[in-house]
Amino acid sequence: MTKTIELKVFGMTCDDCVRHVTNGLKDATGVQDVSVSLKNGMAIVKANNDINPEELPRLDVFKGQYRAQLRSVKDD
């Protein structure tokens, strides 16, 4: 089973920001796919069921310029 996790991402201003956030999320154990939108300031993460969604905003990628807030979690 997988889940879809939606995060609001703050601090992104350009395509390089999107790449940085995308790569930071993809590096997390259990993450299968990531889609980040600069326009919407959102990240959609497909992850294994064993991942704790509340841990994603605490990843290293969100400890500097960027910040994330958990918005929703849906079981697929």
Image (cartoon, rainbow, N blue to C red):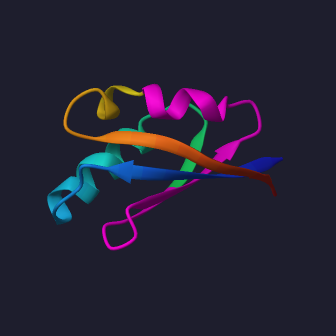
Is 19 a magenta residue?
no
Residue 38 x %, y %: 31, 67
Does 54 sit left or right of 20 as displayed?
Answer: right
Residue 1 x %, y %: 83, 47
Residue 25 x %, y %: 42, 42
Between 72 and 3, which is closer to the camera in this rendering?
72
Q: Residue 4 sits in which quadrant?
A: bottom right
Does 24 sit left or right of 7 as displayed?
Answer: left
Does 60 sit left or right of 31 as displayed?
Answer: left
- Where does the magenta region start and end? 34-58
Q: Which residue is drawn at the image coordinates 44% and 26% (left, top)?
A: 58
Q: Which residue is drawn at the image coordinates 47% and 33% (left, top)?
A: 57
Q: Which residue is drawn at the image coordinates 16% and 58% (left, top)?
A: 16
Is 43 a magenta residue?
yes
Between 9 and 56, which is closer to the camera in this rendering?
9
The relative height of residue 27 versus residue 13 in the rendered view (above or below) is above
Residue 7 x %, y %: 52, 50
Q: Which residue is drawn at the image coordinates 74% and 30% (left, top)?
A: 50
The relative height of residue 16 versus residue 62 in the rendered view (above or below) is below
Does 42 sit left or right of 17 as displayed?
Answer: right
Q: Residue 31 sits in which quadrant?
A: top right
